[in-house]
Amino acid sequence: MKFLIQVVKKASVDVDDKTIGSIDKGLLIFVGACEDDTKEIADRMIKKAVNLRIFEDENGKTNLSLGDIKGSMLVISQFTLYADCRKGNRPSFIKAGDPSHANELYEYILSELKNTYGIHTESGSFGADMKVSLINDGPFTIMLDSDELFS
């Protein structure tokens, strides 16, 4: 599983020219899932993302987590995080999870963020043509890859 995490001042997602999700200060997270991913891996990724100390404190040091600042999350499914660009110029996406499996994990992540962690969470629409807008803060962008974190 991969989470591309961006600290944002604000972010939103539109589908068919209608805003379906919007947050102020918090995290924009793009989520990619592969066939080997499980709810247990998702749990570990969620915990890591929620507890990352990547927000500045009063001294300008990145010592605060999302909960410390009472921030929100905008979570977007993005299979293209599994692009393989090693051969030729056209990316291959064969490592991305089957859409039904990936959607199940995506919905699970959204549910856990809201119900277990109590985080105000907005989302995109799985499989839709989405237009994502953001004001990146920093910019501060991190890639979490479960293969690197938990192997």
Image: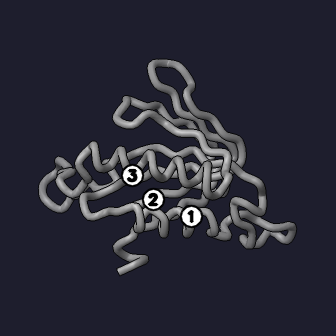
Q: For residue 21, which quarter of the picture?
A: top right
Q: Residue at x 55, y 28 (%)?
A: 20
Amino acid residing under circle 1 = Ala
Q: With 45 as the anchor, is 90 left or right in this view?
A: left
Q: Residue furthest top?
A: 17
Q: How many marks?
A: 3
CA gap between label 3 and label 2 equals 13 Å
Look at mark 3 in the image and give the residue it sits on.
105
Amino acid residing under circle 2 = Phe
Amino acid residing under circle 3 = Leu
Mark 3 vs mark 2: give the one in front.
Answer: 3
Q: Residue at x 40, y 78 (%)?
A: 150
Callouts 2 and 1 close, C-beta under 8 Å:
yes
Q: Residue at x 76, y 72 (%)?
A: 61
Look at mark 2 in the image and give the residue it sits on.
3
Q: Residue at x 48, y 65 (%)?
A: 43
Residue nearer the viewer, 48 or 17? 48
Look at mark 1 in the image and give the residue it sits on.
49
**Which disc is residue 81 wearing?**
none
Q: Residues within 10 Å of mark 3 (few under 14, many from 20)?
A: many
Q: Secondary structure at mark 1?
A: helix
Residue nearer the viewer, 137 or 48? 48
CA gap between label 1 and label 3 equals 16 Å
Q: Residues within 10 Å of mark 2 (few under 14, many from 20)?
A: many
**Earlier sequence position, callout 3 versus callout 2:** 2
Residue 73: percent from left, percent from top: 61, 48
Looking at the image, residue 34 lies above or below residue 90: below
Q: For residue 55, which quarter of the picture?
A: bottom right
**Earlier sequence position, callout 2 versus callout 1:** 2
Q: Secondary structure at mark 2?
A: strand
Q: Residue furthest front?
A: 115
CA gap between label 2 and label 1 equals 8 Å
